[in-house]
Amino acid sequence: MAHRILLIEDDRDISEMVRSYLSREGLEVESVFDGEAAETAFRTKGPFDLVLLDLMLPKRSGTELLQTFRAGSLVPVMIMSAKDTDVDKALSLGFGADDYITKPFSMIELLARVKAAIRRAGYNAAPSSAPEAPAPVNQVVTLKGLTVDLDNFSAAKNGEDIKLTAKEFHILKLFVTHPGRVFTKAQIYANVWEDDYYGDENVINVHMRRLREKIEDDPSHPEYIKTLWGIGYKLGEPVQ
């Protein structure tokens, strides 16, 4: 059965180009051209395996739609936008987008990212076929006021719950379960997104910045996740 994609793009030329290309690759594409039609299609014509979402839409903005989708669904959402700024990326990814591609983009890269997003969603939803060792009961890591519960996918700072997105939690988990190890951006992407790294540093930068804003006392001088300039990141050793 073909994977179903909701394409939300008000530029009809771009929409038809994307729809035609993805359809030739065996994907079923439902195209809509404004925010209200998108919300209706998402509610009445789903479920979809992926949403391709333009940020600048008539009637309802892409960020509004993303919040609506995330309120009741974990469907992968890829932002498509000509606005190539960190502000837009931070806003979109902070609301729960899974990926971001900037216009103009190559159809080959778009297809690769679409397939990767769908594959990751299917992989995460299905039980792994590889045997896993039984996890220790109550895996909790504590580091100077920061508590990370690996079993329950939650984190707290000084007893206060921290609301992390799935990607933010998995980045934090990667570091607290590998103390002392340095991770490059490509390695973080491979571990958290489970896909090849396309070199778009903004995706990593945005997630790392938002994670630090939530866990650090002073995000501009992080203690938990340190930056090694020109190399990557590693778990720090906060002063007790």
Image (spheres, rainbow, N blue to C red):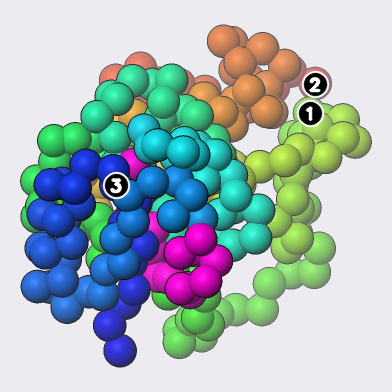
State the quadrant of the N terminus: bottom left
Q: Report the residue at 28% width, 43% height from top.
A: 10
Is-magenta flag for residue 45? yes
> How far apart, in angstroms, are the residues tagged by discs 2 and 3?
51 Å
Q: Report the residue at 41% width, 26% height from top.
A: 88
Residue 225 appears in view: no
- Circle 1 SS class: loop
Q: Earlier along the polypeptide chain: callout 2 or callout 3?
A: 3
At label 2, which amino acid type do we have?
Answer: Gln
Instruction: Judge the density around disc 1: few (<14), some (14-19), many (≥20) Cα neighbours within 10 Å.
Output: few
State the residue position of label 2: 240
Instruction: Judge the density around disc 2: few (<14), some (14-19), many (≥20) Cα neighbours within 10 Å.
Output: few
At label 3, which amino acid type do we have?
Answer: Glu
State the residue position of label 3: 9
Q: Are marks 2 and 1 in contact (CB under 8 Å)?
A: yes
Q: Is residue 52 left or right of residue 102?
A: right
Tell which tag, 2 or 3, sits nearer the viewer. 3
Is-magenta flag for residue 44? yes
State the residue position of label 1: 144
121, 232: nearer the viewer: 121
Q: Earlier along the polypeptide chain: callout 1 or callout 3?
A: 3
26 in relation to 96, above or below: below
* Range drawn in magenta: 40-55
At label 1, which amino acid type do we have?
Answer: Lys
> How far apart, in angstroms, are the residues tagged by discs 2 and 1?
6 Å
- Circle 2 SS class: loop
Q: Report the residue at 19% width, 48% height from top.
A: 12
